Amino acid sequence: MRTGWIRWTRCTRRGRLRANELYPYDRKKRTRILLQQRSKRVASVWKEPLILIVVLVVLWLGADAVLSLESRCYDLAKYATDATLQSECRHFLPGPLSIGVWLWLGLNRDFVIAIAAVVVAVFSITLYGATRALGRVASEQLADMKVAIAASQQATDAAARSAEIVIGLERAWLFVDKCRLASDDDYRTSNNWTIVLRWRNVGRAPAIVEEFILKLCDIDELPTVPDYSAASLVVCNAHAVMPGQTFVTQRLGPSSAIAMKEGKPVRFVLFGKILYRQLSGARHATGFALSVSPHAPTASVYRNDAYNYWN
């Protein structure tokens, strides 16, 4: 009794394990998980028309083979000696064989051709539907690929802009920090002034000054685009400028020969540019323009982007 109980318990456990493998148990909902929910791939196989046709044909042949069996009782001793019974011997599974004879050796070949045409038509329709489905999937994939390419291009552009910003922050920048005007006679004479420019490196890398040019021009004759052809080369008191360091240029001003025009003082614009390079060899330039008053020690920025620039 005990052995039988143990054997029955083992069989019951095996059955439960087998059921859990086929239909796992959801402990939260206390229900079995269906096959379609557990494996969509297995459930989608039965949607294929070709597989469904093959399954139907196999079921048809099996049903015909079973239903066409005839129940007969033979006397084995008499069957061994009677030639009439031997001639009446039939196949054990006449179903599939009879179907084959009926299809290929019978008088129903036109019907078979019609059935084959119908099957081919159904298969063609199925193939057309599958091809259209593949076309839709390909179109969706192409659209997704275009979106992905656009997103990657945007990411690449953003990365390039970020790299340019980082490079711009980690370089040297030279700008005019301050200007100092002076006059020998306290501006009793018009345009009797001199100016000194102070520059500052506001960047994060050292700069090596290569050239600094300066030019004075009447504001009424000033072109829209700066012309540095006749500019004067100005001396600076620095060659290598560290970050945050300042340096000044030599003092200069207009001569008395050009200070007046038609009996009126000329308002000059002082413009120029400084050329410098970094330790990496990259060269940069900063342009500036200042409008200087002929009667007072004041100067303001000349508003023209063609003169005030940096690169």
Image (cartoon, grey):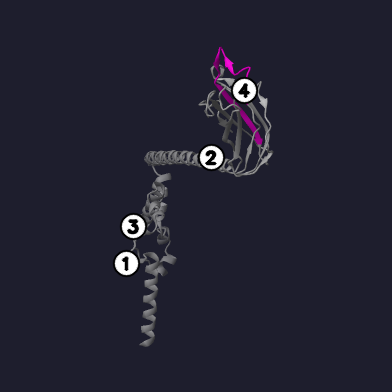
Q: Quadrant of the C terminus?
A: top right
Residue 254's tag is 4
Q: CA distance from mark 2 to mark 4?
A: 45 Å
What x and y, as percent, mark residue 228?
Answer: 63, 23
Q: Earlier in the sequence, mark 1 or mark 3?
A: 1
Residues packed near mark 1 inside 10 Å, few (<14), some (14 to 19) or many (20 plus): few
Q: Which residue is mark 3?
A: 67
- Look at the image and tell me whether residue 308 can be seen: yes
In screen coordinates, is 255 left or right of 142?
right
Q: Which residue is mark 2?
A: 161
Query: Is 215 located above or below residue 147 in the figure?
Result: above
Check contact, mark 2 vs mark 4: CB within 8 A: no
Of labels 2 and 1, the one closer to you: 2
Residues packed near mark 4 inside 10 Å, few (<14), some (14 to 19) or many (20 plus): some
Of labels 3 and 2, the one closer to you: 2
Q: Quadrant of the N terminus?
A: bottom left
Query: Is 30 located above or below residue 183 in the figure?
Result: below
| Secondary-structure class at tag 1 | loop
Q: CA distance from mark 3 to mark 2?
A: 80 Å
What x and y, as percent, mark residue 248?
Answer: 63, 36
